[in-house]
Image (spheres, rainbow, N blue to C red):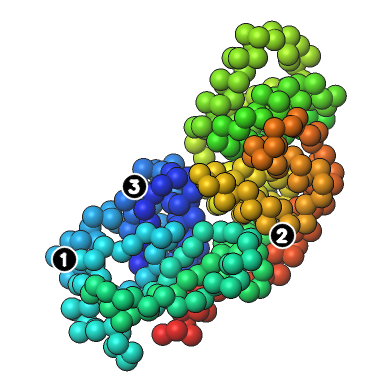
Amino acid sequence: MRWDIFCRVIDNFGDIGVCWRLCADLATRGHHVRLWVDDTSALGWMAPGARQGHWPGVQVLDWEQSRDLALLTQMPPADVWVESFGCEIAPEFIAFRAQSTGATGQKGLEFPVWINLEYLSAEAYVERSHGLPSPVMQGPAQGATKHFFYPGFTQRTGGLLRETDLTARMAQFDAAAWLAQQGVARQPAERLISLFCYEPAALPQLLAQLANHSEPTRLMVTVGRASAAVQAAVLDKNRLQPLWNERKALSISYLPSFSQQDFDHLLWACDLNFVRGEDSVIRALWAGKPLVWQIYPQDDAAHHDKLDAFLDQLGAGISLRQFHHAWNGLNQGDLPPLELGPWAQTAQSARARLLQMDDLASQLASFVAKSR
C-alpha cells in the first residue's frame, strides 16, 4: 500500500522520532511511504540519508510541498492518510484529492483510509477511544470519516512500534564492541546508566547519589538538553561542594548525536535507562532494562495521571513508583535510592507481556485493509 504520513514537529525528538520509525517500519514490510514534515532537521542525525532519499520505500517531503498542486499532479494517490498527533492535513492537499477523484466524501466515493494517530497513553480512555470514527463535517472532505488510532499497552489498543527483526537484532548485539566504537572503555564492576531527560529538579540529587554509591557508575549523557542540564548541575556542585565526587565513583560521558539505531544500542548496553517522551520510553521497554521515564510536562498537570497509568501498566512496585514521582516532580521529597534488581524484574515482565501483542504497524495495516 501507499501511505501519506503527516507530521508537524513540536518536540524535535518525539513527534518526528515516532513518525520516522513508523515510516521506516512500514517500508521494510513492503509499503511505500511519503512523509510530509515541516521540520526535517532532526532526520539529519536521527536517520542519516533520509532527506536525500537513501531509505528504500520512504520519501521525505517538506510540508509546504503538500500545497504544490503541480507536484501533487505527478504523484500517485495514497491508500492511507495518517495525521500524527493532531496535525491537520493542508486543505489544498485534501481539495486536490477530492477534485482529482471526483470524491464527495459520501459512502461509495473514495478518500483514502484516514487515520488520526494519537499520543501514547496507558489511561483507560485509550481503550474506549481506539478505532472510533470522526466524521469530517466541513471543508473539501465533508462527509468523509477519520478514525482515531491509539498506540497502547493492551490488546484493545493499537499496540506499540516494534520492528519485525527487533528481537533478532538484540540477540546479536555485542555491547562491548559497540561501547568500544563509542570510545567507552567499561571499567570492572562499573554500572552504565544512560540519561535522556529534560531538566529534572532532582538531577543534582541523582548525581550526588551516584557519586556516593559503593559501586562505580558511568553516566552516559545524551546530547542536547540532558547534556546542558548535567553540565550546569556539575558546575554548581563543583562550586558549592568541591568534594562531592571525591572518590571519583561517578564518571560522565557526554555523547554525540545518535541515529535511532544507535540510540537503541545505547539502551541495550546500559544497566539502567533514564528516558523521556514517547518514542524513547517504548524503546526502553523493548530493551528490557530497568527504566525511569520523564514524562512530557503539561500545564494542567494532566501528565500526573498519565504517569501513574503507565506505572500501573508496568506493574511498578513502591520504590520504582516513588522514584518516578520524585524524578517527575510530583512530590518534593528526596530522590529514593536506585533498586536495579527489582526494577529489572518489572521491566522484563512488562516486555515479555508486550511482546505477545501485535505491533503498531501490523495493527495499522490490518485496520486499513479492513476499512478499504
Q: Which amino acid does label 2 sit on?
A: Gln
Mark 2 secondary-structure assignment:
helix
The residue wearing badge 2 is: 313
Per the model, the C-alpha gap separating discs 2 and 1 is 46 Å
Q: Earlier in the sequence, mark 2 or mark 1?
A: 1
Tag 3 residue: 39
Mark 3 nearby-residue class (10 Å; few <14, some 14–19, many ≥20): some
Helix, strand or loop status at disc 1: helix
124 in relation to 37, above or below: below
On screen, residue 169 versus residue 27, left or right, reads right
Q: Which image quarter: residue 269?
A: top right
Mark 1 vs mark 3, CA separation in Å: 21 Å
Asked whether 192 or 148 is in front, the reply is 148
Q: Residue 69 carries which label?
A: 1
Residue 330 vertical placement versus 227 (above, below): below
In the picture shown, does residue 2 fall above or below 371? above
Q: Position of residue 271 (x, y in %)?
A: 74, 40
Residue at 24% in and 66% down: 91
Q: What crowding class fits label 2: few (fewer than 14 Cα within 10 Å), some (14-19), or many (20 or more)?
A: some
- Residue 153: image location, x then y, percent: 65, 64
Q: Which residue is drawn at 45% across and 55% down?
A: 20
Secondary structure, mark 3, is loop
The picture places residue 85, in percent across and down from the top left corner, at: 44, 59
